[in-house]
Image: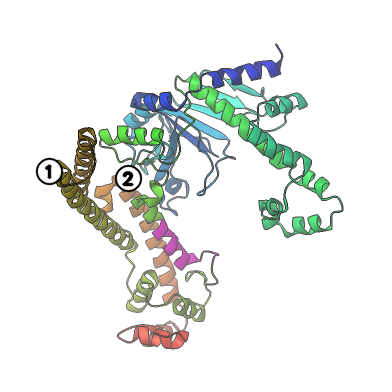
Amino acid sequence: MTKADKFRAAVKKVEEQRMYTDKEIEYMSDMSNWCVVHATKYMPLKRRDGAYYIPSTAMATDFDVPRSTVHMTLNHIVASHGYGSWDDMPIVVLAPYNEVVKQNGNPAEVAGTDTYWAANPDTGLVLPKSAYIVQPDNNGPLYKIGKNGATYKRDNYTDEEIKMIESMLSPEEKEEYDKYASGDVDEWNVRNSVLFVSDKRVKKMYESAKDKKAFLRGLFEEARFDMLSHYLRNIVTRMAIEKVGYHYINSVYDANETSQMIADVAEAQDIPSNASNKGHSNSIYAEMEHLYVRIADTLHGSGFSDIPGILDVPDFAGIYDVIKKHGVDDEVMSSILSSIVENKPIDFEGFYQKLYADRSKSSKEYSQSNVEQFKDELDKHTKGLYKCDEDEYTREHQIKFFQDRLARSTKYVKYWDGKTTIAKFDKNLGKTIRLHCEKLNAEFEAWRNALSKRYGYDKFIESLRSNFYGDNKAKNWYAQSGKEM
């Protein structure tokens, strides 16, 4: 049997073991069948006690960025979507869900497409000893499924290996791959490719090329190899999941039946859950990150506007101009102005706590509103007040439905009681925010202290006070900006 035959046989075996929707739903109804899958650019780190862990972004940036969460999918490798692409992530970490829970506690939220933990900022997300890592090895065979880990090549493919991988591409993948190989890429995709957008020289060379298809074949040669390595990574990950005793799940996507089953299983264990793939983007964790972006933009600029960061301008005139452009109604800039004029530090953590308080209050009010609505609906169905052609099964089904929704909403109302601070909501998130704000405070105070030693500081303070501060600050700012109140 040739290498190509062995590879095809291995892939065929995985496909034969593939589970289809009904079986997948049943399989994922048992939490002991859950395997977490984490695609990343970086190998897990090793602690002094020998355990491996995945650091949060906050830890990796020394708390410059307060992102506390580490994200996983369940029993499948993450697919690209509107919030990002993971196709170029070469390392895939697998671990039994229940064993990850033993090491770290329950996740912040469970979803088939996005289960995430708020990692302890001292330890990161600790991996169990049973964790299995899929990683590149360009000096080894095309792939190897070992006892404790798997490897695959991402480069240096032989002609035979290229043909082996090409032979296993799906029709859709083969169609896209062949376009890159022939240079037959449509004009829209060419001009919107990363290469064209990021490098004007490439665009100019393309415009002047006599044989544009030949130019594109060379240009997209690396893209073809990326496709091959991406596909091989996915195949090896499928094999690895089967190797460690789990089944790869194909039909996990936003709000489908498998995702709903996973959410229901977690809900039954009192773990926050979501059948959607947008749980994190609508969460308090994400709102903390959005606030960080606002603060970072004010302090250092974002590159998305012509307003520089206030800490990066060289002189008083620049600082004055930044304040004027941001405006006195901007909460962050208003606090910076007060700090400078009144010679006092900023409570950066207060911004986060206020945001949390507003969000937790609205979440509780929303749940309370649902309680009232579901009570009313349940009462009407129980008394048979709806005049419709519903048989008893339907009536009983509706009663059970609203009883379930009422119980869930009542639980969420109680859930928010007592969670008065970020730390009481999630101690790991709370500590991450605190460490981040301590760093912000130190940076800002060092800047403010240096500012106070500059020549002309007193005159600058008086200018800020008279133009942007006090009872007439809004009127004065609008007058200077040329805008109407």
In the image, taking residue 231 as reference, residue 342 lies left or right, namely left
Res 290 → quadrant: bottom left
Q: Residue furthest left?
A: 383
Picture quarter with the N terminus: top right
Residue at screen point 43% across, 63% down: 294
Residue type beneath disc 2: Asn
Q: How many marks?
A: 2
Q: Amino acid at mark 1?
A: Lys
x and y percent of residue 134 in the render?
54, 28
Residue 304 numbered mark, or none: none
Determine the residue positioned at 44% across, 38% down: 113
Instruction: Give the magenta range.
Output: 290-304
Whether 467 is among the magenta residues is no
Picture quarter with the C terminus: bottom left
Residue at the front extreme, as displayed? 389
Q: Position of residue 369 (x, y in %)?
A: 21, 54
Which numbered disc flags the more N-terminal residue, 1 or 2?
1
Q: List the residue tagged with mark 2.
A: 428
Q: Identify the residue at horizontal 28%, vertical 36% (top origin).
A: 267
Dot 2, how many residues are within 10 Å of its Cα: few (below 14), some (14-19), or many (20+)?
A: many
Vertically, is 470 above or below 68?
below
Q: Is residue 263 visible?
A: yes
Look at 37% across and 44% down and name the residue there.
121
Q: Secondary structure at mark 1?
A: loop
Helix, strand or loop status at disc 2: helix
Q: Which residue is mark 1?
A: 383
Q: Is residue 293 magenta?
A: yes
Colouring of the image? rainbow
Q: Residues within 10 Å of mark 1 (few under 14, many from 20)?
A: few
